[in-house]
């Protein structure tokens, strides 16, 4: 898969498409063509290559097909290669380059659709993947969090992470089709959680006052692998919560994939 990713990134036009989605995720084919001044046929061909490499994933909304930047393959390459060298130095240089070339996050957030869509392919079965998403023994290993529920629609979900226990009547399962689809509301931002993870009183108040988001896992068997799509949406435009979790999902999914395929957990950066 690394070869396909590197080949896809080798083309400047495809990198421009990814830059466009990074600036404003969830674009249609028409929007991508207009924003980059590229012919529709060329954009379609490049998108097909990016989708095949897993760098772009799509979601249908009515008649429209929306395209999203999928960070999971890039995160996997980072885990495999950069961790062997000097991740801290590479991150510092990347952050400096981003700061110099792009507007601040406060400006970017108004341009992007308030949702995340990630896709990864895992050599496992739908049943095993469902277990990994719902069994505390699994989630603790790759996520560091324990989710307790009977996993039926309407049931509450209790979240525990590093000793901080989060329970709320509105923290519930929305959909549950074992081996196919799981959706639940995102956890509550309690004072205990804020103190545990170093959120300021001001930031915690803002996050607690935002509309509750939701996360959905779509599971699709494909031969010996399973296609997992994670959709985290329901955010308000300019959401502080969305900004705070922006780097979390690729790492979680990389850890999930590694655990299911190798039985091992990723090293802590």
Image: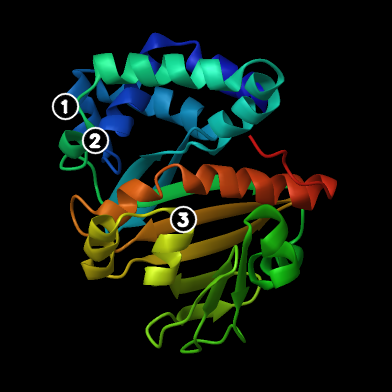
- Give the quadrant of residue 68: top left
Residue 119 percent across, percent down from the top left: 53, 46
Is disc 1 in contact with disc 2, using a CB cutoff of under 8 Å?
Answer: no
Determine which of the numbered discs, if any, sits on residue 105 in the image.
Answer: 2
Q: Earlier in the sequence, mark 1 or mark 2?
A: 1
Q: CA distance from mark 2 to mark 3?
A: 21 Å
Locate the N terminus by quadrant: top right
Is residue 16 positioned above or below 192 on the image? above
Residue at image position (26%, 40%) is 27
Q: CA distance from mark 1 to mark 2?
A: 24 Å
Residue 196 percent across, percent down from the top left: 48, 60
Provide the residue designation for mark 3: 197
Label 2 sits on a secondary structure element that is: helix
Is residue 56 positioned above or below 5 on the image? below
Is disc 1 in contact with disc 3, using a CB cutoff of under 8 Å?
Answer: no
Residue at image position (35%, 41%) is 67
Is residue 45 positioned above or below 159 on the image? above
Determine which of the numbered discs, if any, sits on residue 25 in the image.
Answer: none
> From the viewer's perspective, is 82 left or right of 192?
right
Q: Residues within 10 Å of mark 1 (few under 14, many from 20)?
A: few
Q: Earlier in the sequence, mark 1 or mark 3?
A: 1
Q: Earlier in the sequence, mark 2 or mark 3?
A: 2
Provide the residue designation for mark 1: 34
Label 1 sits on a secondary structure element that is: helix
Residue 70 percent across, percent down from the top left: 46, 38
Q: CA distance from mark 1 to mark 3?
A: 42 Å
């Amino acid at each position: 898969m690394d070869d396909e990713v590197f080949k896809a990134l080798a083309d400047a036009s495809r990198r421009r498409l990814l830059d466009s989605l990074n600036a404003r995720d969830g674009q249609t084919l028409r929007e991508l063509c207009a924003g980059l001044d590229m012919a529709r046929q060329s954009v379609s061909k490049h998108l097909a290559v990016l989708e095949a490499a897993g760098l772009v994933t799509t979601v249908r909304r009515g008649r429209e097909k929306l395209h999203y930047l999928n960070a999971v393959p890039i995160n996997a390459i980072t885990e495999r290669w950069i961790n062997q060298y000097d991740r801290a130095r590479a991150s510092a240089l990347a952050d400096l380059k981003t700061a110099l070339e792009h507007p601040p996050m406060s400006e970017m957030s108004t341009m992007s659709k308030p949702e995340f869509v990630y896709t990864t392919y895992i050599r496992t079965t739908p049943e095993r993947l469902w277990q990994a998403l719902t069994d505390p023994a699994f989630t603790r290993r790759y996520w560091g969090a324990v989710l307790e529920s009977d996993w039926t629609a309407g049931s509450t979900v209790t979240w525990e992470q590093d000793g901080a226990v989060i329970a709320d009547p509105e923290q519930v399962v929305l959909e549950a089709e074992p081996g196919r689809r799981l959706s639940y509301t995102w956890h509550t931002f309690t004072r205990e959680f804020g103190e545990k993870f170093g959120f300021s009183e001001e930031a915690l108040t803002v996050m607690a006052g935002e509309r509750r988001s939701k996360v959905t896992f779509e599971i699709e068997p494909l031969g010996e692998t399973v296609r997992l799509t994670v959709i985290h949406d329901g955010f308000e435009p300019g959401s502080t919560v969305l900004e705070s979790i922006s780097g979390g999902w690729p790492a979680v999914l990389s850890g999930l994939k590694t655990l299911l395929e190798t039985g091992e957990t990723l090293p802590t950066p």
